[in-house]
Amino acid sequence: MVRRGRNYFSLNESEQRTFSASTHKRVFISHKKEDRDVAKKVADYIMDAGIDVYFDEYDTTINRNDPKSVVAAIKRGMQLSTHLVVIFTNKTLSSTWVPWEIGYGDATQTEISILKMNDIKKSQLPEYMQIVKVLLDIYDLNLFLARVQNTTTENLISEGGITAYNSQYNKLRDSVESIAG
């Protein structure tokens, strides 16, 4: 059975101090505030695969009315992450924070991937997003998670970490294509 990943803010202080990107993989979840429900589904799916996440909705240290606090939290979360996954929906097109997070992730050499949701076509992605890896569907996401875990999708599925892309029980089916057609 795969150990469920954790959100950074569920770790105790000792675990937070001993975190090292060389020994722990962590995915920073970038999303537009209005997409927090689907971003939470994706964060949970990633944690089910045994990978830790930084998801700002769980960060109780952020003063959301203070841009400096938001920027400090994003920087801290990104510095503690090895990967960045952008939840990209039609709403993301109007985001100011998501492009900033991508730029910061690129500057810190964080591996960046875009997870395209059902409500947008790949051709609608802005040019700056087309230079990074685009995960078009659950199949691509499962491959990404297996690579991060240094295993195969078959192992993650058999160990109960993720659900097959074409399974009717996959909790992302209503938000992400099963497989790009």
Image: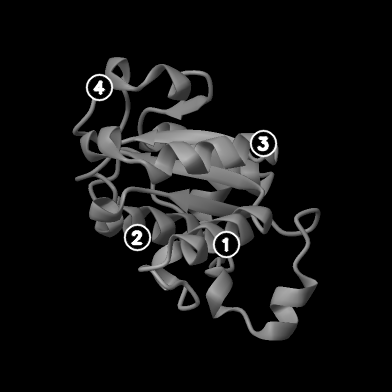
Disc 1 to disc 2, C-alpha distance:
21 Å
Q: Which mark is residue 72?
A: 1
Residue depicted at x 26% and y 51%: 35
Binning the other alpha carbons within 10 Å of mark 2 as few (below 14), some (14 to 19) or many (20 upward) gives: some
**Of the pair 14 and 94, the residue shown nearer to us:** 94
**Of the pair 78 and 151, the residue shown nearer to us:** 78
Question: Dot 3 corresponds to which residue?
Answer: 107
Q: Quadrant of residue 77?
A: bottom right
- Mark toward the start of the polypeptide (2 vs 3): 2
Describe the element under mark 4 as helix, strand or loop: loop
Q: Nearer the viewer, mark 2 or mark 3?
A: 3
Disc 2 to disc 3, C-alpha distance:
26 Å
Question: Dot 2 corresponds to which residue?
Answer: 40
Q: Which amino acid lies under the numbered mark 3 shown in the image of this protein?
A: Ala
Q: Which mark is residue 121?
A: 4
Describe the element under mark 3 as helix, strand or loop: helix
Q: Is residue 60 above or below residue 121?
A: below
Q: Which amino acid lies under the numbered mark 2 shown in the image of this protein?
A: Lys
Q: Nearer the viewer, mark 1 or mark 4?
A: 1
Q: Position of residue 153 (x, y in %)?
A: 53, 41
Q: Position of residue 136 (x, y in %)?
A: 37, 28
